[in-house]
């Protein structure tokens, strides 16, 4: 696992590439990094940016999926009291009992549709609201199936992108630490190019930053004076 926060590492990656290229002619040691640092930095930048770009898609798909499942759950819950009243031995406790598990809610929706299709009242007659119930339930069930399947697919893609970003971050972070040590010996710790590659300088803008460099996270403002700050994400 990289020891430097990913957003800081992303900002430092571009700086490191440019510093190495700019100072290579001054030292054989710095020049030697040309075969390793640019490639590792570029791999991390590409992986980080791909995950960051996909995050909005992932959030949208997850929101739509959870929203469709929540709508289905409300439909299920709305019909349960009537079924308890009208269908002998109907057990409502097995429907919607795991509201935070989308797959279970969808399964419950399918089971409830079967109950509505087949159930009869105590005198053996079809449920008088069968058609109305199914006309409301089935579209919600289909929407939940569709939207949650898309959400799961988006989540799979996003997790793969995050995994690649983490893996390339580990490789580049180690390279950056090594490069900083060499740079310190070659140009001195007071040199501006060494200073800009320090982790605590990553949150500050720099001429070597690129347009895609992520912004520092917004500071958290307490809701009221004296409120405790969050301990972390």
Image (tube, grey):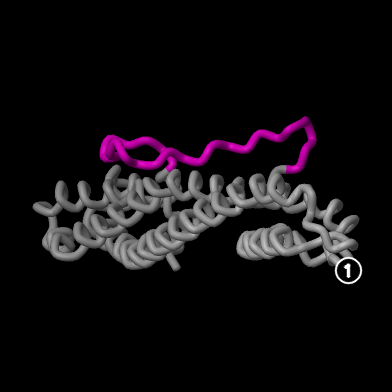
Locate residue 65 relative to residue 173 in the image: left or right: right
How far from the left and from the top, in percent, is residue 125?
82, 58
Tell me the SS state at disc 1.
loop
Instruction: Answer left or right for 8 relative to 210.
Output: right
Q: Tell me the residue at 61%/51% (across/down).
A: 138
Residue 32 occupies which quadrant of the picture?
Answer: bottom left
* 83 vs 37, nearest the viewer: 83
Camera-side residue: 220 or 22? 220
Residue drawn at (77%, 38%) of the image: 227
Q: Nearer the viewer, residue 199 or 94?
A: 94
Read off the magenta span. Answer: 203-228
Q: Main secondary structure of the magenta part?
A: loop
In this image, 147 relative to 205: left or right? right
Q: Position of residue 67 (x, y in %)?
A: 61, 46
x and y percent of residue 75 in the render?
71, 48
Give the labeled residue for mark 1. 89
Dot 1 crowding, Cα within 10 Å, few <14, some 14–19, many 20+ = few
Residue 89 in the magenta stretch? The answer is no
Residue 59: x and y, percent?
Answer: 50, 47
> Can residue 79 be seen at all in this image of the molecule?
yes
Q: Give the residue drawn at x 38%, y 53%.
A: 51
Q: Is residue 213 magenta?
A: yes
Which residue is drawn at the image coordinates 79% and 54% (left, top)? Answer: 127
Compared to residue 196, the image places residue 98 above or below, namely: below
Residue 233 in sight here? no
Residue furthest to the left in view is 25
């Amino acid at each position: 696992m990289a020891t430097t926060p990913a957003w800081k590492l992303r900002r430092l990656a571009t700086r490191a590439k440019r510093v190495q290229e700019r100072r290579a002619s001054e030292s054989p040691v710095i020049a030697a990094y040309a075969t390793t640092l640019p490639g590792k930095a570029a791999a991390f930048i590409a992986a980080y940016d791909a995950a960051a770009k996909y995050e909005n898609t992932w959030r949208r798909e997850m929101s739509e999926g959870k929203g469709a499942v929540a709508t289905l759950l409300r439909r299920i819950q709305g019909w349960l009291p009537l079924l308890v009243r009208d269908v002998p031995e109907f057990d409502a406790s097995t429907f919607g009992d795991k509201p935070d598990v989308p797959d279970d809610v969808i399964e419950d929706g399918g089971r409830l549709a079967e109950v509505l299709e087949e159930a009869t009242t105590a005198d053996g007659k079809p449920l008088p609201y069968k058609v109305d119930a199914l006309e409301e339930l089935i579209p919600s069930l289909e929407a939940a199936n569709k939207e949650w399947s898309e959400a799961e697919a988006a989540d799979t893609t996003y997790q793969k992108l995050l995994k690649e970003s983490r893996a390339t971050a580990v490789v580049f972070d180690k390279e950056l630490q090594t490069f900083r040590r060499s740079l310190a010996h070659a140009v001195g710790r007071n040199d501006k190019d060494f200073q800009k590659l320090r982790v605590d300088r990553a949150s500050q803008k720099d001429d070597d930053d690129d347009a895609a460099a992520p912004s520092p996270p917004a500071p958290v403002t307490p809701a009221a004076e004296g409120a405790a700050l969050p301990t972390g994400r």
